[in-house]
Image (spheres, coloured by chain):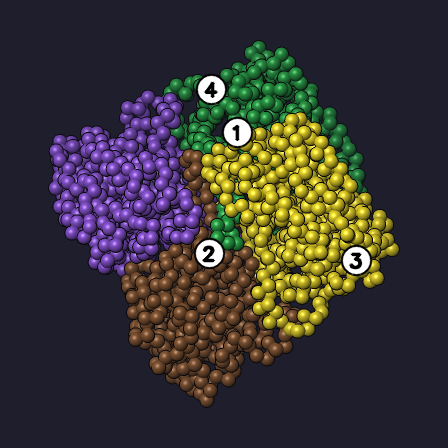
Chain colours: A brown, B purple, C green, D yellow
Amino acid sequence: MYRALASRALRAKSLCDTKSSTVLASFTSSRLNHSIPFATVDAEEISGAHPAEVQSFVQGKWIGSSNYNTLLDPLNGEPFIKVAEVDESGVQPFIESLAQCPKHGLHNPFKSPERYLLYGDISTKAAHMLALPNVSDFFTRLIQRVAPKSYQQAAGEVFVTRKFLENFCGDQVRFLARSFAVPGNHLGQQSHGYRWPYGPVTIVTPFNFPLEIPLLQLMGALYMGNKPLLKVDSKVSIVMEQMMRLLHYCGLPVEDVDFINSDGKTMNKILLEADPRMTLFTGSSRVAEKLALDLKGRIRLEDAGFDWKVLGPDVQEVDYVAWVCDQDAYACSGQKCSAQSMLFVHENWAKTPLLSKLKELAGRRKLEDLTIGPVLTFTTEAMLEHMENLLKIQGSKLLFGGKPLKNHSIPSIYGALEPTAVYVPIEEILKDTKTYELVTKEIFGPFQIVTEYKKDQLPLVLDALERMHAHLTAAVVSNDPIFIQANPFTIINQSINLLTIF
Amino acid sequence: MYRALASRALRAKSLCDTKSSTVLASFTSSRLNHSIPFATVDAEEISGAHPAEVQSFVQGKWIGSSNYNTLLDPLNGEPFIKVAEVDESGVQPFIESLAQCPKHGLHNPFKSPERYLLYGDISTKAAHMLALPNVSDFFTRLIQRVAPKSYQQAAGEVFVTRKFLENFCGDQVRFLARSFAVPGNHLGQQSHGYRWPYGPVTIVTPFNFPLEIPLLQLMGALYMGNKPLLKVDSKVSIVMEQMMRLLHYCGLPVEDVDFINSDGKTMNKILLEADPRMTLFTGSSRVAEKLALDLKGRIRLEDAGFDWKVLGPDVQEVDYVAWVCDQDAYACSGQKCSAQSMLFVHENWAKTPLLSKLKELAGRRKLEDLTIGPVLTFTTEAMLEHMENLLKIQGSKLLFGGKPLKNHSIPSIYGALEPTAVYVPIEEILKDTKTYELVTKEIFGPFQIVTEYKKDQLPLVLDALERMHAHLTAAVVSNDPIFIQANPFTIINQSINLLTIF
Amino acid sequence: MYRALASRALRAKSLCDTKSSTVLASFTSSRLNHSIPFATVDAEEISGAHPAEVQSFVQGKWIGSSNYNTLLDPLNGEPFIKVAEVDESGVQPFIESLAQCPKHGLHNPFKSPERYLLYGDISTKAAHMLALPNVSDFFTRLIQRVAPKSYQQAAGEVFVTRKFLENFCGDQVRFLARSFAVPGNHLGQQSHGYRWPYGPVTIVTPFNFPLEIPLLQLMGALYMGNKPLLKVDSKVSIVMEQMMRLLHYCGLPVEDVDFINSDGKTMNKILLEADPRMTLFTGSSRVAEKLALDLKGRIRLEDAGFDWKVLGPDVQEVDYVAWVCDQDAYACSGQKCSAQSMLFVHENWAKTPLLSKLKELAGRRKLEDLTIGPVLTFTTEAMLEHMENLLKIQGSKLLFGGKPLKNHSIPSIYGALEPTAVYVPIEEILKDTKTYELVTKEIFGPFQIVTEYKKDQLPLVLDALERMHAHLTAAVVSNDPIFIQANPFTIINQSINLLTIF
Amino acid sequence: MYRALASRALRAKSLCDTKSSTVLASFTSSRLNHSIPFATVDAEEISGAHPAEVQSFVQGKWIGSSNYNTLLDPLNGEPFIKVAEVDESGVQPFIESLAQCPKHGLHNPFKSPERYLLYGDISTKAAHMLALPNVSDFFTRLIQRVAPKSYQQAAGEVFVTRKFLENFCGDQVRFLARSFAVPGNHLGQQSHGYRWPYGPVTIVTPFNFPLEIPLLQLMGALYMGNKPLLKVDSKVSIVMEQMMRLLHYCGLPVEDVDFINSDGKTMNKILLEADPRMTLFTGSSRVAEKLALDLKGRIRLEDAGFDWKVLGPDVQEVDYVAWVCDQDAYACSGQKCSAQSMLFVHENWAKTPLLSKLKELAGRRKLEDLTIGPVLTFTTEAMLEHMENLLKIQGSKLLFGGKPLKNHSIPSIYGALEPTAVYVPIEEILKDTKTYELVTKEIFGPFQIVTEYKKDQLPLVLDALERMHAHLTAAVVSNDPIFIQANPFTIINQSINLLTIF
């Protein structure tokens, strides 16, 4: 968890280091600059005319299906990807494959230790592949096609994934399996602690980071000897399908991972029948709760959150803070797990041009470069309806946005909304439970609540924060030590669970 | 977890070090040898004639109730303890008390750091108290009265509890709150990791270790800044009720912990209304699953397990191994979480006097010194019925025991059975799912399954082990490196969750 | 080292917690409140009329000598302690005793692991003893008699020593011996790391912390299985001689430590002949260099340092900063290893009453309560001469102090000087090497240099700091992030080496 | 140290993974297979006719000298490398360059944190370069030219160096700079621990591992913010001179490292005048002691050792043990720091064909493939004289070898001896100090002592081991737990100091 935490925390502004890529390019063959040895699709050419097909992988083989889930291009509505989904008649090979892994795993500190080194090598090679400009560009563009975000944001996802792999080069995988011992009570006795795999596990991941979330979780599970069955949201699974091919090219044993495309009902059937020893689920709270019940607690959850930022009394660097707020709220069209949902503005900040700068920055976002784009889990109507409900609260007002995007061909199953901010008075937010729940409802899109507080209203802010149950990220913008220490906010760092812990 | 793991792993034979107690005694006043300043009961004198009363504690005050749960003395059936249970009309003070703790806890690395030192002091003083012979004896005898086990076993529980407290003397509590930081991407940026409390939490613990389990879990939660509400199984809660008084005497702030006696329905109501940020539950799988659902996953579970031991091909030290097997299966009348439920005997061992020694050692156990005693969660009839079902399996036979205890006054709500072992052929165990589930049903009492395997039947043993889902402890008795390496059994160390983890 | 570091760093204002001592007292016998079972002297009654005698300890026995080193009471010059010093004719038993310990130590993770638990017990008992008010008072007064400092300072030394022992109660000693393993290249291979003792070692400690330095170093060495020969500066060795008796009383095996009083020449002979596998030396650089040569590098050094404090541009809490500066410069009459030798004052601070407050606080120090007292390694004349040399530097001046103490009977072999501060202009300090070396000469007494710098003279300050070779502590008083980040001073935490590292 | 330890411990049989190299080759351009962009020499073509020149590097520039040290090819005596050595007139630029680095280093957790990432990138690129078959072959052959050893041994050195670099890819350098904090005594106080550089440092390394030792030590120093001046034994410095060019090619800032060729006297002058804050010296004890004195202890030493192996009573896998013994004694012509100097054979092993197998394996070593080759620090005569002295000991005898190599053109300044083993009776070894010192004199060449012991002579073996002062590696070949536990040998793992520790 630590490494993921660190990677994540440091990711924000890690741009794709193009200078270093250039240097690396000089190390590599010209052949690679023109084709990609593992890839079966061309990210640019996927279209209604040339649809791509996504397969599943089980027991060492790629398999198709007669059952296709056809995806619409989020930018123009063309049917552009056909996902061959496994239905209930096809689950048996997946169940059998999981069953072939014993609960002591494919390796552990006593069994097949050479596999720790193998995974160090796979990571080294895969990291090097992702550092090649054409491979990095391939995945960046593929991400953009299915989870529209700016080139910089998508390239950042590829970059973080590469850095994760670099962190596990050489001996680092086996260092992760470091055990300890403590002297016992008498001659010959020691107390040992080992990092042990679960054995057969499943990983279920969402649409918003098609490469980073599944790859990090998958590799973490593999490093420690688990055999994962991976299911990525079908809307974006083409990215990991291609990444699986890269991993195989870099030496991943084909028996080690299965990869499935299916609907939720089929996946649920597999989970119940295969009874994996652990499931790592990243996604909606609703599904998470059902799975927790079905799997009798053998699950780790990464669910959603309502993320907030508090601007303290000491005003400083207004331009920079405005830029960060804009990025946190609207990058990836507000579809990061960590996207800012609510901004608490101290009265001292309210006197600055902060809000007008926010409006200006939001206004620069445009569909052409995907700095604003389709929302994959809320329709335009749903977001507008939520906005209308908020605007019925006394004293609330629209700060900016609030209109559907224009001149686009985003299909109606997806949302298309301008970056939007709604102001709600702090007193109203806390007025009653119903209002509080309305205001703190998570909208996974380019939408945030803004409120202001006076010096003596800090207790209201603290009360509002205290009542939130799920929040992944939280920020306090202040260097005032009295403000920070006297009011210890809960700081929750976002973490990505890795199936590596005993 | 690490510390608990170590303590546990090393506990097995750590007897109460009477020599060191004697030395300590010479440091201490004679007054203390005759009375115990915090105690409100006398462990020896509790009886039908002089029943003890157990109270709850909330918002800094001990409270009674009009609603008594009267416990029968497990050794003679006399109504000897009256537990004042909170009913649904009394839950409000507990809910309010939990609500007073914010989700950033009573302390954390930024808030009230002096409280880490306070808990170092409380641990130092409480450890010293438990090292006093009369206090150690008081808790040992009190444990014996409600969870009958031998003096040595009960004293061992007090000893382990003391060692845990000694491990958190001085600065060790604040060392537990050690944070880290990693350099960031640019000037002024660092990535920090802190150990953070949950805030309001609940702890629910079972009957079999009335002192050790709740005390370790309680202190772990307190060390890191949580505010716990503690509920111990009413059958044994008198032990922790007295321990709460000791902790208050040693400086525990009265606002920091609430302590409740109630039935499960009332406790469930509190959990649903107070909505604690984490619950640590140790107990039956049935209740655990219901709680996991009610609490939407905000729970950590310590449930039951079916524990096994495999004797490998290399025979050695038959006497010692027999002694360990007897202790593991029948100490505490088989009511340790880690009690051995099944013994796999290699044919080489079958040729030794091992089984006859086991029978002999079991035969020495007697009610007088509580080396065998009441079973608190199974009646005699239930255990006998299970035995009868097992004996219907082809080839199975009773090895020893199998009869109700004689000449006792254990009330019929409890079980009273001789140490019992039933032999079942390895082939039959694996014959079908129904038989497998019957054989591996956990009986929390002095009851074990024994089976034998030939050299070429090792795959059957591995298959049997692989199919078990819940097991806390597992042992392989062999120094044969080929046997161990070629057949990597799953080794699951028993751990006690502590609410100390971010 | 970490623990020592933490203890040290946190020690500054940890007063003897009298409230907690009182509580502990109620746990303990009245007998102990009146006599101390292990002590052979009475701290109050040592005098010319009733001189105390200090012995050595070797091969399990206390031994005297015909060769006495008679110490003068630092407060009145009376011959009050007779140290029986071993001369060259008596070294053989010490050499033989060291030779009896093999280079794999008295214990290690494979040998006698029960001794880790033994040392956990010894620490628990010794910590408890030091928590008894009469024992704490005994050592506090004994320290004051030989290393005059205020009661609070001496009690603080006893308190820190107790906290160190509390940190190693229970299982903590064995946790210190935690080993690790990393999976190897192939089946059956692992790479292990163990914490291993040196075996026979020597520890040589100075006069200024008669209890804390030798006890922490001694216990650290013992915990990990070394057999130490301990030599404390004869001027103060009575304190550790009594502590040895306390440790024996608490269960320290008499074979584990030898304790010697001797002159340097004799000790050198032992070191050369016994050839211990490691020596830990705390003391003057001159002796340290000779030992490094004689012992061919098998030595760890804690030598002296010239410690500085820089006040940055942001003025705040002048009273508090003045109080800290006074404590850092003059507590223990400036004879802490960490005593402030030089203060750099930003021009913004120069405009505040800081310097007048410093003068006022220094003026309150008086011989009666030992807030100022004898200097054990510099005579009055030597310090005055150094001051005169400084005052010859152009622009320098005496800020306060600079006179011999009056109305005292401190013998002339010791120093007796008022708390003194000399101002030297920053430009002059850096003028030439000779001046720089004069100004940064360490005076182990109540003596500091003060200088001022203007905003644009910060490079001079940095240059002055850069040129210092030995410094144990360093402080920057500023919350100005630009000041701190743009000018990264070297921060050197003071550490006490413990002979516990492989 | 830990990582180095692990790398080293696991290195033994890590062959150059040619399969993986092949895969990597397919990733890379054909251009690279024919030329090496950074190299200024061709490893194959260096000869008397085409001598290579080795330069120094200071203040960002490569520099020559008028002062050449001409090296003879160890295989044929031709003058084949001209090392431009800096003499006393040229030291000033090196001293000034070191002085430009302040004692808080080039970076630290507060200063220039982006440089931790830079070094992660440099490591990634350099590791990738070393994984390219032509680059790996280039360094392997270059090592063979100056420190003759078999291709496999030299390739192993390149492989380990690559693995070290892989271990510090991505974020791993900054993870190495992880700091910690512990809560303090009161609000606002924390105790922090940082990993801090020394600042200007020097590294001096020997001839036997021309790439691995200097590269690992250099990178460790750089990672943590030090500025090193590196001096490699001139006999082999061409390897690191080329590696410096590779590092510059991979992004190493030219100001960060200086590289010097000089004689010892000149280097000593630099050390005295530049006064680096730490020196890491790997080499002979004689020089180490002089440096320790000159540098007043600011030095870390990796000196020589007399390494032994004990074969216990349980005979097993004679062929494998013979193979390991042969490798440990004679690989790299016995010029590894860890080369086996002495073999203790239990009487049970003496009855096996072990010794005849040893002789047979030694006999297969031949100059053609450099499985035996020149000895760089002992002449043939010196080794033969030592052998003759040993053979004068009563009962000693030559087991095999003992003759100069034939048909070779190794120049007479180097040694050329067959793999040699001399038997000396255990009783004679311990007879007197003179004999003991003769037998345990380290010969850095293909030379070992063999002795035998009977069951009841184990105390003699232990005594012999106990008396050795310097030993880097030690092995016990036994799975007999009684033998191992009852006789705890000192196990000293070889470590390479890295200048990374605060």
Describe the element under mark 2 as helix, strand or loop.
loop
Q: Residue at x 28, y 47 (%)?
A: B452
Q: Which mark is residue D456?
A: 1
Which of label 2 and label 3 is nearer to you?
A: 2
Residue C90: name its quadrant: top right
Q: Are marks 3 and 4 in contact (CB under 8 Å)?
A: no
Describe the element under mark 3 as helix, strand or loop.
strand
The residues tagged by marks 2 and 1 sit, at their Cα atoms, a distance apart of: 40 Å
Within 10 Å of disc 1 (Cα), the crowding (few <14, some 14-19, many 20+) is few
- The image shows residue B57 at horizontal and vertical percentages of 26, 42
Q: Which mark is residue A112?
A: 2
In the displayed structure, D395 sits above or below D86; it is: above
Q: Which residue is mark 3?
A: D54
The residues tagged by marks 2 and 3 sit, at their Cα atoms, a distance apart of: 45 Å
Q: Which residue is mark 4?
A: C38
Q: Nearer the viewer, residue D151 or A434?
A: D151
Which of label 2 and label 4 is nearer to you?
A: 2
Specify whether residue C245 is in view. yes
In the displayed structure, C128 sits above or below A407; it is: above
- Marked residue chain, label 2: A
User: What amino acid type should be assigned to the residue bearing mark 3?
Assistant: Val
- The image shows residue B92 at horizontal and vertical percentages of 24, 51
In the displayed structure, D405 sits above or below A63; it is: above
